[in-house]
Image: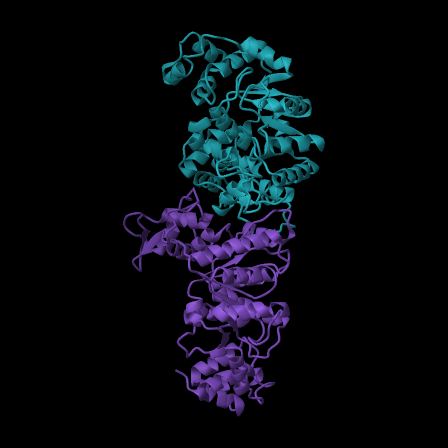
Chain colours: A purple, B cyan
């Protein structure tokens, strides 16, 4: 358990740089939160963390930690840090992968408002996102999926916005489920203003979450940064409606980057608010989903899918490209071949063979004993 | 050009066995149509074609060839045989692939009614199929896609049924395009009866096609057999609406077997008539399409797709089955190889090589100078 001083240090550091701030996160990991706060405040930052100097230049001199913690407390909120038991470490870890860290790694800490423990609230959660200009159809489908998820004891994460987000939150509340709103502003700022009451209701049973300190206003870049948290905190992301250009597409892109399963709901091809969903499905970036059961199959691949509606199972080699197929065909069912022997057998160079073997092994189609390769059984 | 006697022999043989009758087709290929007709009529069938004896047992004794040809002529129809220039040989060849021949190989001959040449009428054609119980939405989308295809000088193949089929035919006629109705009954039988007038209109500018002799009534198994022709005669099959159990799903399955690109139109998840389409898309058996441009991209992969909204282009060999891929890999980029040499090079028998070559040529991947084969450029 953090003491009061340490939590203030976290709150201070959560303010001194605009999130996401991977460099600051690294400094804390290296020297601890107390030393990091002191180093930032006194401009005595170790040379290897020089980047932090620049990141904190504008804000280091104003320590609002105590006020921020007070402001959070006034709306029933608190600061959750990586040192707290309720920190959702596993879910956020995907954000530190090389290709995502640059655009927004793990949050430094999260401000949360509401009675739930953060890690438990998102332990079984699905993000439902979509167009602010939702159609009646989109609202109807959002309600159906939300209610279905609540019935299966899943919580629903969304962005608290008008349209699909709001409908999802409201339906979960009405069904007695847990819903989590991740904001692009402070947890004490009700944005959008028209959702002031909704956000208060969410905070009564669920959670309102933000990496921005109390008092921070919503801003365009903050929505994009926020979207990565929506994708990271959920077992799957479902886009119910999205137009040609939609914020939901950004959340979807984050889901892809993080490996979070992504579903999209189809709609009438005549509806402008389904254009984005159809494109994601057509391009193969999102799986078509029609109801909460489809969504849960997406979130839990392989679990209890005996009753799946998907009638035809593809032959296991159907999804291979030409090179993978040639490599697969060259690997023996009994005995093993080395990479060199496989390369010779299929007439592809070592580099091609290696990358194909990696894919085939990841799909469980081949096994290796370290030196030789053989077909996996079953 | 066939003489009158040969055409009668074809007409006789087209009657003596219920289509599809691969064995009878083989007999004709081996001994010629005149000898085959005589052998069947006199029960002197060569031992290696013994199967034909059984197939023709019930009908061999009644030669209605002259009457059938007359009945066809009375409705402006004729019998098109593999010996006629307008026989769509390449398109139908896919039906003789090993895995499809058993369930319905190439038709023996086709009865056609209308002014168009069969091969030309389907040279650039898309099959539009779907639920008989079409919704207003389905009808609207069918009209849009049909009109778009006509505008690009494509013809539309369908089954002449109520619902999506009928809407497709009607819209093509209204736009001044060519439409082809493939029936599960004789070309002189208007089925369904309510489409009597529509079928006549189709036959005025397009074609009504059937492998069943004049006078044959529609029957359940004939719809399934007919569906394979719809899939074979088209460059792509589009399912606009399909319920949980739909005949369109059978046509879609044939498209998959034959390697005909398959598209499905999404719709509201609340619509029972879109359930089948959503399942095909979700299972990855059909590509999501929303308009005629999507459909044409599907029918002509790689052609003029600069403006495609789909980000990822498949490699051209991605849609080949394992046999086609082996044959493709054996064909040289410079110089030519004979079928025998290709067979040797890829270790597949002549029959497999021939049908793969047909598909690869039809897709524009290979070229032949009549004796040798080479890769197509670009």
* Picture quadrant of residue B168: top right
Pick whichever, A161 or B354, lies toward us.
A161
**Residue A282 placed where, x, y %?**
56, 49
A34 or A70, which is in the foreground? A70
Q: Is residue B186 visible?
A: yes
On the question of residue B86 being in view, the answer is no
Would you say B343 lies left or right of B271 here?
A: left
Image quadrant holding the N terminus of chain A, namely bottom left
Horizontal side of residue A234 vs A58, given as left or right: left
* Image vertical order of residue B333 relative to residue B205, above or below: below
| Place of residue A235 in the rendered image (x, y in percent of width and height, measured from the top left) | 45, 61
Residue A269, image x, y percentages: 62, 47
Residue drawn at x 50%, y 51% is A289
Q: Toward the viewer: A45 or A369? A: A45
| Residue B344 against residue A54 in the figure, above or below | above
- Relative side of A374 to A158, left or right: left
Q: Position of residue A245 (x, y in %)?
A: 64, 59
Up-down relation of residue A184 to residue A150 (above or below):
below
Q: Quadrant of residue A313?
A: top left
What's the residue at 50%, 71% (across, down)?
Answer: A204
Q: Nearer the viewer, residue B222 or B61?
A: B222
Count of marks, rendered view: 0
């Amino acid at each position: 358990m953090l003491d009061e001083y340490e939590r203030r240090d976290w709150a201070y550091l959560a303010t001194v740089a605009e999130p996401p701030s991977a460099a600051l996160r690294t400094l804390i990991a290296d020297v601890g939160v107390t030393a990091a706060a002191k180093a930032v405040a006194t401009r005595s930052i170790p040379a290897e963390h020089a980047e932090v100097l620049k990141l904190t230049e504008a804000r280091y001199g104003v320590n609002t930690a105590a006020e921020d913690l007070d402001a959070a407390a006034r709306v029933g909120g608190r600061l959750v840090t990586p040192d707290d038991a309720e920190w959702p470490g596993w879910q956020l870890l995907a954000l530190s992968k090389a290709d995502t860290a640059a655009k927004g790694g793990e949050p430094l800490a999260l401000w949360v408002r509401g009675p739930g423990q953060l890690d438990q609230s998102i332990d079984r959660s699905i993000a439902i996102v979509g167009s602010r200009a939702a159609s009646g159809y989109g609202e109807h489908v959002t309600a159906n999926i939300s209610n279905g998820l609540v019935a299966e004891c899943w919580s629903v994460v969304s962005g608290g916005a008008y349209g699909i987000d709001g409908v999802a939150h409201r339906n979960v509340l009405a069904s007695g489920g847990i819903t989590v709103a991740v904001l692009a502003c402070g947890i004490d700022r009700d944005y959008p203003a028209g959702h002031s009451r909704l956000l208060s209701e969410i905070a009564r049973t669920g959670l309102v979450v933000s990496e921005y300190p109390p008092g921070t206003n919503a801003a365009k870049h903050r929505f994009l940064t926020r979207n990565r948290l929506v994708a990271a905190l959920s077992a799957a992301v479902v886009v119910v409606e999205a137009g040609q250009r939609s914020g939901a597409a950004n959340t979807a892109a984050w889901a892809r980057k993080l490996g979070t399963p992504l579903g999209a709901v189809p709609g009438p091809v005549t509806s402008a608010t389904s254009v984005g969903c159809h494109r994601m499905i057509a391009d193969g970036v999102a799986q078509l989903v029609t109801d909460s059961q489809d969504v849960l199959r997406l979130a839990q691949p392989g679990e209890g899918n005996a009753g799946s509606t998907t009638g035809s199972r593809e032959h296991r080699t159907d999804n291979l490209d030409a090179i993978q197929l040639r490599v697969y065909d060259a690997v023996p069912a009994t005995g093993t071949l080395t990479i060199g022997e496989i390369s010779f057998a299929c007439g592809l160079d070592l580099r091609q063979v290696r990358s194909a073997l990696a894919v085939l092994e990841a799909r469980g189609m081949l096994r290796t004993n370290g030196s030789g390769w053989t077909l996996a059984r079953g």
